Image: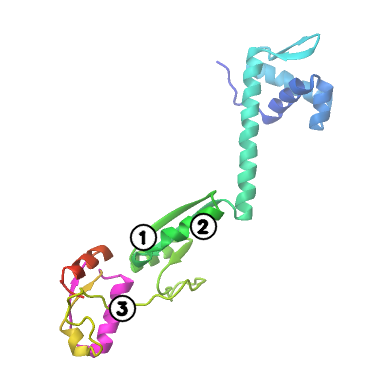
Amino acid sequence: MVDLRSLSLKQLRAFAATMRTGSVTQAAQALFVTPPAISTHLKSLEKIAGHAIYQKNAEGPEATEIGQELLEAANEIEKVIERTRVKIEALAAGASGSVSLGVVSTGKYFAPGIVARFRQFHPDIRVRLAIGNRTEIIKGLEHREFDLLIMGRPPAHVAVEREVLGDHPHILVAAPDHPLVGDPDILPEDLLRETFLAREDGSGTRALMTRFLDRVGGGRTFNFVEMGTNETIKQAVMAGLGI
């Protein structure tokens, strides 16, 4: 059995250069080493292979079948090394690698567009997009699972750099035939009689809604039905279940 564990890149390069240039002397010049060093690498490589790797003829050295296999291996290794070099340089320049984006549920309607635009300019960067409620996304940030976040209010207890993407208005939504639709003078009492459709505890939208109703209602209780997704809430609003 041939044991290639002691095979070295220097040996393969010496052999490839000898076959490419046609002589040990020229191979040494190409690799900036001495001819004896090339000869030593060739002998070591031949010993590892256990068979002759090239033969001499009038036109110069010619690789044997075993030598051809070694040349192919050397060529593939050089390709891998070159790809690795390019990737390392790209990573160092910020043009490659991966980025993890955490987005709160309400941002999922425009986040894919942002990712698509980003990919146009950085096609070699892998993107992982995670959607969750505010608590889940902040927890992921605390555990360093995300590089970037899209959310309504950045967490105060985590040191982050923040950039405003745009306005994030919140409005009341009701079915078209709801009695409050079109009423310009809605009173707090009118709202507190309604059933509110709320996201689960931990959602930023849920927290905002609760603060709003506590403020307009002066701490009075209000009715709500909890739902896990924005899509379910939209369907419930259309069905007249609440606002």
Viewer-nearest of discs 2 and 1: 2
Q: Please state if 187 lies on the left or on the right of 154 as rendered.
A: left
10 Å crowding of disc 1: few (<14), some (14-19), many (20+):
some
On the image, the x and y values in percent for residue 200 come to 25, 68
Task: Name which residue lies at 18% across and 89% down.
Answer: 189
For the residue labelled by badge 3, is the local secondary structure a helix, a strand or a loop?
A: loop
Task: Tell me the residue that label 2 is attached to.
Answer: 118
The disc at residue 241 is none
Q: How is the image coloured?
A: rainbow
Q: Please state if 7 lies on the left or on the right of 238 as rendered.
A: right
Task: Name which residue lies at 30% across and 70% down.
Answer: 202
Residue reaching furthest top?
Answer: 58
Q: Quadrant of the N terminus?
A: top right
The amino acid beneath tag 2 is: Phe
Q: Which residues are magenta?
A: 200-227
Viewer-nearest of discs 3 and 1: 3
Mark 3 vs mark 1, CA separation in Å = 22 Å
The amino acid beneath tag 3 is: Ile
Mark 3 vs mark 2, CA separation in Å = 30 Å
The earlier-in-sequence mark between 2 and 1 is 2
Q: Looking at the picture, does residue 167 appear above or below residue 71? A: below
